[in-house]
Each structure stands twice: as C-alpha cells, then as structure tokens.
Image: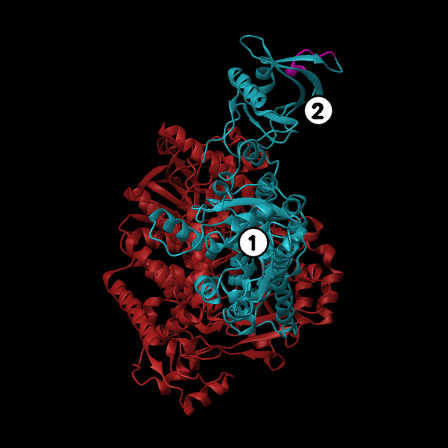
Amino acid sequence: MFAYTDEPICACSTPAGISGLAVIRISGDGCGVLTDKCTKILRSSGDYDRTSLLPGYTCAYGTVNDPKTGEVIDQVIITHFEMPYSYTGEEMVEISCHGSSAVKQEILRCLGMSGIRVAYPGEFSRRAFINGKMSLASAEAVMDVINADTERQLQAAGSLLSGALANRINAIETNLYDQMARIETLVEFDQDVDDGTNDGSEEKEILEELVKEREALSAICSGYGKGRILSERMRVALLGLPNSGKSTLLNTLTGYDRAIVTEVAGTTRDTIEVQIDINGIPVTLIDTAGIRPTDDIIESIGIGKAMEAGREADLVFYMIPPDMTADEAEEGLREISEDIGGERITAVFSKSDEGKNPDEEDIIEVLGSLGIEKHISVSAEEEFNIDKLEDVIMTYYDSLGGGQSEGFLITNSRHYSKFNKGLKKLNMAIEALEDGLGVEVCSAALRACLDEIGEVTGKTVSATLADTIFSRFCIGK
Amino acid sequence: MNPVEALKLEYSFDAGNFDVCVVGAGHAGCEAAHACAKLGLKTALFTLALDSLANLPCNPSIGGTSKGQLVREVDALGGIIGKMADKCAVQMRMLNRSKGPAVYSPRAQEDRAMYSIEMKHYLENLENLTLVQAHVTELLTDDEGRACGVMTAGKAVYSAKAVVICSGTYMESRTIRGEVITESGPDGLPRSVGLSGSLKACGIPILRFKTGTPVRVNSNSCDFTQMTRQDGEDDVPPFSFENEMNGQGVAPISEQIPCWSVWTTPETKKVISENMDRSPLYSGVIKGVGPRYCPSIEDKFMRFADKERHQIFVEPMGRHTNEMYLQGFSTSLPEEVQIRMVRSLPGLSNAVIQRPAYAIEYDLVDPLSLKATLESKIVPGLFTAGQINGSSGYEEAAGQGIVAGINAAMKVLGRKPVIIDRSQGYIGVLIDDLVTKGTNEPYRMMTSRAEYRLFLRQDNADERLTPVGREVGLIDDARYEKFLAKREAIAKETARLRSTYIGPTEALGEVLAEVDQTLPKSGESLADLIKRPGVTYDMLAPFDKERKELPKAITKACETDIKYEGYLALEKEKIERFASLEKIALPEDVDYKAIKGLRLEAAQKLSEIKPESVGRASRISGVSPADCEVLLVYLEQRRRSNAE
C-alpha cells in the first residue's frame, strides 16, 4: 500500500500506443500553479494568461514548453478543474495533446521538471475513492473499463459503473436485510406471550423470500462464466502435429502474419498468443509447438507448454492434416480429451485445399470414441469454413452464463468469489429453516451471507480490501 | 474537590484509607465490591439503605432471554448474582425451548426480601469488605484530576486508589404518578443528592433517563381461577456453574410457586385512552427518555394502536408476602386511574393495590465518555457500572459491575485491564454498545444485539469466560479443576461420537422414522446421525453400546456442538474477521480532523469517542465502511512514515 498524500501527480490517461490525441491528467493541491511553469496560454475566453488562473471547468488553447529552454513541445488544450468537483476531488488540470508517444513523454518530462511527479498505478482512482468520489465497486469498474478492449467488455464493465448490476445486487441485499429484520423479531419473540401471531406463517414467508433471492443471486453468479471471458478473454488453443497448419490458421483468424509460418516442421517452439475480437468476444488464440515424439530438449519443452496451453484453454482446435492416420489422431487426442473433455475440442481437418483425408471416416469414429463430436473441414489458404470455426467460439460463449445479458454480468473474479460464497451461506440459511434448526441458526448464516455481499457493495469493512483493489490499477486512472 | 480541601471543611473527618470505594450496593455495586474484595483489595461498599441492599425494585425475577446468558457469564467470571439467584429462586424456567439451544435462556422468579437478606449477609462475611450505610455526596479527585476518594453527607472523607460508582436510578431522582411528583428514590427509598453535580463539576457529561414500575397487589384480593397458571420446570440447570458441577439445583419443583397470566380487556384500553392527557409522559412532565423495550402499558397502547389487548403476568414477590407484581403493566398514570386500570383485568376486579406504579427520572453519565474497561475517559480511576451508564435491568448491571470491579482492581494492582469483547460474551456486546454507540434510552440487553449468538450460549458461558476469571484471580483451584475436567469430558465424548459408527439395523430405522429420517444405507457415525434434523443424543442410546453415563450439561454440549457444527464454523469465520479489525489499534493521539478524506461527521464522532481500534470505529454510528477504509490507509501511511 502506498501512502496517501495530495502532492501533485501526473500521468497519461489515454492508452499507450499511437493515437490522434492523448490526455495527460494532473491532480493535487496547487497543481495549477506548478503547471504554469511549463505551459503558456495563448487564447482563452477571459484573457487569462496562466493555467492556474483559468476558472474551473473552462479550457484554453496554449502550448507546453520546456521550463528551462522555453522550447515549445506541443500545442495543446488545457482544462482546469477546481476541488472538490473533479475526478479525484482535488484541483486538476487536463492537457489534451497530440498522441505520439514522443510528445507524451516530453510533456511528462516537462511536468516533472515543474515539480509534478508521475503517478503510481491506480493513484488517481485511489484519490477519487478516498475523497468520496467513488465507491470501491465503481473504482473496480473504472479499472475494468480501462482494460476493456472489446465492445462487449465495455458493456459489462459499464453496467457496474452505471449501476445495472449494482441495482440488482442492491435489491437482493435490501431484501435479505428485510428478512433479517423479520428473523430477528422472531428470535426476540417471547414464547410466553401467545397472542396468536406465532403460527409459523411468518417463518414460511421468510423462507419463500430467501429462496427467491437465492435464485436471483445464483443467476448473477452463473453469469460469471460469460463475465470471466469478457474480463479475462476466451482462450482457444491450437494443437496438432508439427506442420499441421496451426500457424496458418492462426494467421487467417487474426488477419495478418503474426506467427512465423514456414514449411520446416517445428518452427513454433514456444506458444504464441494473439488477441482477437470475434463478434465482440475477446479471444486469445494460442498457437503451440507441434506435438510429436522428440529428443530435442528445447522442442520437448515447447511440447510441454503446448499440452499445458491445451489443458488451460476454454476451447481446443486440434488440427488433422490430410496425411494424418486414425491411429495418429487417436494418439494425439487421447490425453487432452481425457483432461478437458471431448465437448471442448473441435477437430479441424486442415488444408482441405490439398485434398480430403483418406482416413476421414475412421478418424471420425475415433473422435466419437473420445467424445469429440465437432469436426470441421477448413482451408486456411482459401478461407474455407473459417466462419464455422468462429461459430464454434460464439456457440461456446452463448452456452455460458445462464442467459444473463451482458449488462448484468459479473466480470470481476473477486466479485464472483464473494457472491458465490454468499450464495453458499444463503443456502445454509435456507437449510436451517427447512431442517427446523431454528430462526437463530438461520440468522447466523444470513449474517455471514450479507457480510460476503457487503464486501462488494461496500457495507462490510475488510482490512485488506482496499489494498487488493488499488494495487491492480494501471497508471493514470 | 481534593481530600485536603475536603478535610478542611467544618465537621469533616478522615474516615480511613481504602483501595477501592464502591458507591451504591445494587446489582452492579455488589458485583464490583465482591470482585475487588476477592482480589484482596481493601474495599468499602456504600449504600443509602443497608436493608435494601441488592434490592429488586422492579420485577421479582432474574434472567430471561439474553439476561439469563448475562447471569451465567457473570457467574463464569466468578461473580455472585448466579449463586444468589439460585438460592432465592421460587420458580425456575428455561425460556425459548421452542427455539434452538443457542437462545435457551434460564429465568428465575426470586424471593425479593430473601435476595436482599442473603446478599447482605454474604457480603458482611466477605474478607476485605466494609459495608457502610451513608449518603455519598462528593467524588474526590487529586490535583491531576484522578479519582481518589469520596465524601459523605456526614462529611466523612474516605480516600481510595479507585472509585466505582453504581448509583442506579438514585441520582437526583424523582418519582411521578400522574400530576404527583415526589423527590424520592425507587421503592420509597432516599435519593442521592449532590453526587451528580460533583461528577458534572469534573466535566463528566450527565444525561437524564426515565423508567417505571407497575403496581403490586395483594394475592388475597385476586381470583386466580380467571387466570392462566404458569408453573416452573424441574430440569432447568442452576445459573451457577459451580452449583451445576456440584449437582446442586434450585428449589425442587414441588416447592416452586406458580405465576399467572391474563389479557387486558377493552375496558383497560378505554380507561387508558380516556386518561392519556394525565400521563406525565405525554403531557410533557417527564423529560427523561424512557425505554422502548420495556414500555409502560399506556405506551404500548399508543404505539401499537392496532393491538386490542396485551398480556400481563401476575408474579409472586416471595414466599413470605402476598404481594403480586403485574409484569407488563408499568404506568405513570395517576393512582386513581391505576386502580381502574388494574380492576379492568380478569381476576383482578377486586384487586387491592399495596404499592402504586410510578415512573422515575434519574441522572446518569453519558456512556460515550467511558472506555471499554468502564473507566471514565475524563476522570482516571473513576469507574461506573449499571444504570448510571444508561442500561436497564439487574443482569445488565451485574455484568458491568463485575467488569468495573475487576478493572478498578487491575488499576490499583498495576495489572493489565480486562476487556470482554463482542465475541466473548453478551457482557462484551453490552459494554461495547454502550461505550461505542451510546444510548438515548435505558439500554436493555436483547439477543438480537449479539452477532455471534450461536457461540454466545448460556450453556457454554464457562467455556468462554471461566479462563478469563481464572486469569484475573476470581476462580479458585477447585472450581478451575472441575471446569477443566468438564471441558475435557466434552471434547472426549464429541470425539467418540465422531468415530463411533453404527450399522443400519431395523430398530434404528424405526427410531429414525419417528423424526421423518430414512435409514442410512451403510454404517453412519453417531455424530452424523445427530446432525440429522430431529435426531438427539438421547434417542441413540439403545444403539450406542459403549456409552457411559455422563452429566446432562456435557451431553447437551456435545449435541449442540455437533448439530450446529457448520453454522458455528460460519460464526468462527465472522469472529476472525471481527478480530482482525479489532486488533488494528487507533492511537490516542490521532488528529481525526486532519485526516484527509474522512467525512466531517465521521471525524467529529471519532474525535469525540476516540475508539481504541478500527473495529470499534466501524461500529460508531456516523462512521461508514468507507471512512474505515480511509482510516486503514491513514494508519498504513503513519506506520510507514514512522518506519522511515
């Protein structure tokens, strides 16, 4: 954990890499005056000649200059924010500059010379949180937005920020607290006072409500399958013998020559990962070393990595070139199909432009015996049936997550873990009532359940939570 | 005033030096004085009326839901309320039997006169303890503002190293019946005048509360044939673990006296509503805040307007009196209205009232000015316990009394203070609530205030607190050895139940069928069988060949531990979470107003209460979880800058 101070910090808030424009954020008490040292205002609506004099929420045209030499680094737009109404709750300046990395580096250097240090990862959001500008859940969602690089990821992350998922969780939490209050009334109920209200109907109603919320919470938890893929990407491993067409397929799927494709078997010694977006689903394609018996130590390491990649993948595409026999196919697929199950493997009859595999019928029989039902003939060269492989990815994604729409998905593994634990405890609360263990026992489990949910909604304090979350932030947000 | 000045006053004299002066001999004061004397300290116990020592001025009963737990906890620590309550019980019951063992609560009807006589006689014989009938009017403090003695109305100056004040409802009290206001303590006893002002002069914040008590009627004037009889039970364990271990119970069922119950009638409601304008509570005569959880009958009709009737219990006040106490019928309406109200009840149409009901207003100390040891933050060496701290009830008083007594003794002896936390007992919950959240009405213990209820049971109070009492020095060798033996017996039997398997016989199937359980396909451990809904330890006796005869306290404990296993584990996890925040200390010198990010309200509350830990801070109303996260960040920053 880093210490909290309000000394001025700066960082580039737009993603690394080249873009048309970039934004550099500066935050902290007195940051305007420090920024004056390396900026010149050339045009503003009130003839203000310094950044620190700009009224809050107005912007001006100007330049960033080297504070020593006065050399102009870039022409920029400067916006000034006053505390406490800014992203971090502190005085802030935003500089919109040109997006080349050299310009960004130079501006940061000039700011550094003016007494503004570069921010630690997550420091902006941490300040925003500490100044009451966002809840922990929103802080986490901000991070998810930063990390989002496909459209669906943005949708899911946005739902936590804007509160679609938060609203659902709050509804569950509120009702569970209501039931808790009813249970407590029953616990306090004096058995001696028999006024006819204690006929067990209250307990029954509470049970019904708990069962209802169990379903709601369970639906949210089951959305994590999809949510996890949105935040961590679907992993699709390409396995097969050397020179069976893995790298060619990879290049076709990604659209450019990412892997080195040669005719020499065994070129891909290490695994190569490429991130692609298939209809909005973030996918990591993993090209692996060809799996064949070998004495070459380096190659055998590559093969070990390939098998590991296969085992950890969501889906495996196993390449069957035209010259592969049924025995070879069985040998190559037996281990992996036992490890991850045949339903997650697709047999790809590759290089179909080079002719049909003579053993195809026998191979399909072998596949069936291993529980592999999906097989597709493709030609990467001619882009034949590539869309069918994409369909396999789409179908798998749709099979996850119990029909939750993207707006309600949990994408964060900490949230999932807390909700899942809460679900288990809610289940125990329900069992306590069903088994007649007593309302006070039900209450103990329900309190424990609410504690877990509260760690996401911010109702429970945890000694380690803030650390865990903020250490994961990237710089600038 | 300091003792030197006090001794310069006309007629004042030096009445001696004590280690601890305890002011007030109610249920808090008796426990405090007992603990100090037992720990070898020269102790003086002051009371306005020796003949009313340990008085039960309100209901003649001890225990009940959550209060029964408090009594057993005080006993487990080495206190006396449990033994006295066992000795003077005229009826014993276990409440909440329809619920689980976690909330079983023993309650006894007590012989009020005997209770006072027995307690007085016991304390008279206690080594190191001096009983003094006197009116304490002044707390003495030294030049550094530390408590160093007391002075009485008779100008007797007692010096002490620590002072414990347990003034109950006596400080500047006045009783109210309709328009009639009397400057008096409860039960027509003298009130305490001056002490409250003396505390205020030391800078201690003083509040004013109200409580009340119902009428007592002569049983000869009651027609019990129109009431529902409620008898005692003969299988209730005594309050005192020592009695339980020695096989001593309370009076046998044949010697127990019944209670009775009736319902209010439409006439009762009518009489009350017609006279509401004469209620001092509603007319504004009473300014003190009354208890929500023990409301007067007019309060009940006002607040629960939809309820047509309320239940009233008619309870005996003792073996040598005809007085019957009308529980649930407390009121501050005028006496003439009280007669009509009482006579509207079934079986009481000819009732003769021996003592009218009254409300009482009294001064107390704002408990937010106390530490968890019950020592004042403003006057070091001054401890307070019982109703002076804003609680209500004998059991709540006793629980604070023993903690205040122990900590006064620890202070004098230069030993580490003793804090009972929320995961250790209802006593911990009670004190933590009072000193952390404060209270704006007389605080009554309730099971729902405790978050670790499955663990804080009446049956395992010894398991939780006897080691603490032993450490302090209130548990002697003989008792401690018996405690250890009991603990071992429970562990051994539980282990045996887990490792003993019995086969699926037809006979077992029949027993299981009685509680809607199916016969297991193969052998199952006794523990797993006990875990099934409806199955009990006793039920399995015919199939458990190796079973040895064990005391019920032990077999019940095994059964509870096994049945609640999974849920106890949840609570344990919760307790660990609780303990992790409780361990993070907040230094006394923290300047909360200078911590960036702390909301203004939180900063104000924290500066005022100065909690000892982040855990305690998190329970202060007005301090949000986000504020606590800020405190954690602040502490880490402070730790790092100190390390540099």
**In the figure, B317 relative to B209: above or below?**
below
**N-terminal label among 1 and 2:** 2
Question: Is residue B49 visible from the viewing direction of this image?
Answer: no
Q: Depth-wise, is mark 1 or mark 2 nearer the camera?
A: 2
Is B582 on the left or on the right of A227, as rendered?
A: left
Q: Is residue B587 above or below residue B553?
A: above
In the rendered structure, which amino acid carries the disc numbered 1?
Answer: Ile
Dot 1 and dot 2 residues touching (CB under 8 Å): no
Which dot marks residue A453?
1
Instruction: Where is residue B479? Give x, y as percent.
Output: 27, 64
Chain A tint as drawn: cyan
Where residue B234 sits, quadrant-wise, is bottom left
Q: Residues within 10 Å of mark 2 (few under 14, many from 20)?
A: few
Numbered disc 1: secondary structure: helix
Q: Secondary structure at mark 2?
A: loop
Q: Which mark is residue B625?
A: none
Span of residues in magenta: A47-53
Residue at 40 percent across and 69 percent down: it is B561
Expressed as whole percent of the image width and height from the top left, the position of residue A380 reads 60, 51
Judging depth in this view, the residue of A227 and A199 nearest the camera is A227
Circle 2 residue: A57
Residue A397 is one of the magenta-drawn residues: no
Furthest toward the top, the residue is A69
Tag 2 subunit: A
The alpha-carbon separation of the residues under discs 1 and 2 comes to 38 Å
Q: Residue at x 35, y 62 (%)?
A: B463
Q: Residue B12, how many percent across, how many down? A: 37, 36
